[in-house]
Image (cartoon, grey):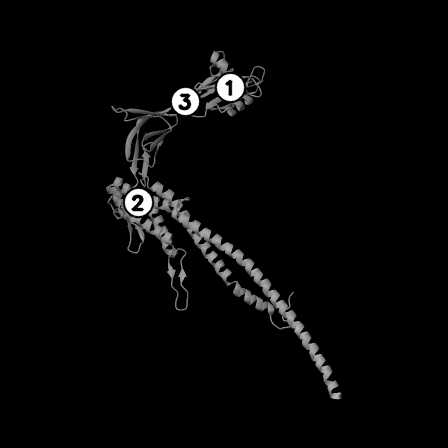
Amino acid sequence: MKLDGLVSGLKTEELIKALMDVSAIPKTLITNKIADRNTIINNLQSLNTTLQDLVTKAKTAAAPTSPASFTASSSSESVTVTAGSTASAFSTGIVVDAVATAHSVVTAAAGSSAWGGTFTVVGTDGEPVEITPTGTGPRDLAKAINNAKAGVMATVVPAGTDADGKPLSRIQLTSIETGEAGEFTIHRGSAADVTAGTSVDMGSESGAALLTQGADARVRLFAGTAAEQALTSASNTISVGEGIDVTVSKPSADPVMVTVTRDEKKQTSTAEAFIKEIASLLTRIDNGSKATVGDVGESTTLGVFTGDSTVRNLRTALANAVQHPVNGISPSTIGITISDKGVLSFDAEKFAAAVAADPEATQELFSGVASRLEGVATQYSDKYDGLLTARITGQESEVKTLKTQVERWDIRLEQRQATLERTYAQLEVQLSKLQSQSTWLTGQLAAMTPSSSSS
């Protein structure tokens, strides 16, 4: 019941609102605190995600071969070369004696109803795979072979017509994998018939043919020397050195020169990109830790990380990991430095010169820095016991507690408002009663005054 100004003339609703605003100040302070904590949590989580990503990148950068990069080439288009992370400078000639081929046969021509019964595919491992098509047509058998996962693909090939003009078909079978291991035979008959020698080898029937013999790729290193060495592979890709593979496409009687050289430019750019990422992370922490002092009469604005000891310690640990010596050698010798103001920088020219002078030592020093960075990032971002993870968990627990306090304040304020509304309503009622009594007394007094005069 609203009695705003009914008797007292007071603006009751405004009074209650003003009193409630005062009563709600503690809740407002808690709500603002929750908003601040959530902002901090979001920034800490974002920082933690960056650190977790850094763990992966640092682990790669800390590998013994990182950030080594190589350029590979060959003197023939029939040979392509790839150099992996474990490669090193390399140059030699190879002779390609053979390329890998898939075993392939085609059956003799037969009519449309000659493809039923039980068939068996036998690979070089000697394991038979029985195949029973649902029909007697060539497509039924081809489908059954393809579904049997016997390492063979089957395709129906038209083969003209017979003397009566009826269509004939063949089935071409090709091993899925290239190389000698892909060789197979297909028989009419069950696995038991194959074992007993009573089955029929369809590749040996009159009119059937061997299209290609399954063979491995074969190359020779150091051909014509006492160190000549043959290498084979079921595929056309062969490893000719640690981290170095060649892929051949046709035989070559003359040696093909294969060359792998260190790509100093790419190696430098890879290292620079990694160090710049660390520098960006340090700058991000610095910007989030600044406190902006306002002019006279203005408030001071704090950064999201200002006063956070965990983030401050993280910043120190990252900086130490980058600038401290590795095995007594300073990272500054390969162009990684931190200024007196804490700014991390990378000198690409100095790094490239270090790589040119001593690639192994440069690589070892860089890997050592990356390894320490990986350790710091892991220590702080580990999802179970990381220091930054624990900080986030603590902030989230505090927010949960604050939200509970807000809920309690909501109940208190609801009760407070109900009390105020009831009090002011009773005030209006009491004032109304007093006003009624005053009016009655005034009437009574007015009625008594003439009687006294007449007496």
Please, what is the three-letter code of the amino acid marked with disc 2?
Val
Left-right relation of 6 to 44: right
Which residue is at the front of the view, 377 or 453? 453
For label 3, the SS is helix
- Residue carrying label 1: 130
> Where is residue 435 shown, x and y percent of the image?
66, 75
Using the numbered discs, state the Cα–Cα distance from disc 3 to disc 1 in whole angstroms. 19 Å
- Residue carrying label 2: 369
| Image: 281 above or below 129 | below
Most extreme residue toward the front is 455
Instruction: Tell me which label, 2 or 1, sits earlier in the chain.
Output: 1
Q: Are there few (<14), some (14-19), or many (20+) residues within 10 Å of tag 3?
A: some
> Where is residue 169 shown, x and y percent of the image?
53, 20
Q: Are there few (<14), some (14-19), or many (20+) residues within 10 Å of tag 2?
A: many
On-image quarter of the N terminus: bottom right
Q: Are marks 3 and 1 in contact (CB under 8 Å)?
A: no
On-image quarter of the C terminus: bottom right
